[in-house]
Image (cartoon, grey):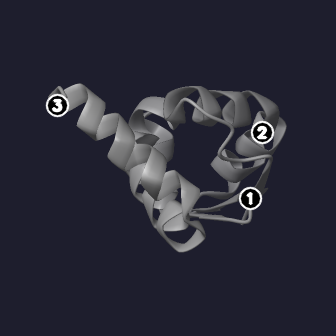
């Protein structure tokens, strides 16, 4: 079995377990957040968490938070595309 096959098997196992899945999703999202949202948004993001397929984002800039509210659908698609599966179905911006 190749390294890629082992990596996929471990990823599938983690995704199949609820507690591990939440930790995996949060780690995976934090590692790609600057690529998904952009460096400016990442700079003003103080908290990211996925719970029950909802992404909770805390933004420290009111104008940026307002702009993010308008682009929630595009952001949702980008996050799921980067994570390569439907990790979230809704976004809550605080």
Q: Nearer the viewer, mark 3 or mark 1?
A: 3
- Count neighbours of disc 1 (C-alpha within 10 A) and say few if under 14, some if 14 to 19, many if 20 or more: some
State which quarter of the image contains the C terminus: bottom right
Kindly identify the residue that appears in the image at 47 percent across and 67 percent down. 20
Q: Is residue 81 above or below residue 43?
A: above
Above or below, 53 against 31 in this view is: below
Determine whether label 3 and label 1 are within 8 Å by CB: no
Q: Horizontally, is 46 left or right of 65 in the view? A: left
Sequence-first tag of 1 and 2: 1
Q: Looking at the image, tell me whether mark 3 or mark 1 is earlier in sequence order.
A: 3
Q: Which residue is mark 3?
A: 3
Q: Which residue is mark 2?
A: 72
Q: Secondary structure at mark 3?
A: helix
Circle 3 Cα neighbour tier, 10 Å, few/some/many (<14 / 14–19 / ≥20) = few
What whole-number distance in Å separates the C-alpha atoms at marks 2 and 3?
Answer: 36 Å
Residue 30 lies, in percent from the top left, at 41, 52
Q: Position of residue 75 (x, y in %)?
A: 68, 34
Q: Nearer the viewer, residue 51 or 18?
A: 18
Nearer-the-camera pick, 5 or 93: 5
Q: Is residue 57 above or below residue 38?
A: below
Residue position for label 1? 54
């Amino acid at each position: 079995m190749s390294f890629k096959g082992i990596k996929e098997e471990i990823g599938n196992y983690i995704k199949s377990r609820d507690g591990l899945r939440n930790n995996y999703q949060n780690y995976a999202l934090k590692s790609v957040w600057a690529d998904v949202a952009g460096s400016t948004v990442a700079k003003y993001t103080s908290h990211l968490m996925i719970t029950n397929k909802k992404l909770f984002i805390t933004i420290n800039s009111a104008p940026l938070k307002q702009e993010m509210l308008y682009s929630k659908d595009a952001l949702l698609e980008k996050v799921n595309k980067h994570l390569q599966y439907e990790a979230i179905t809704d976004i809550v911006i605080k």
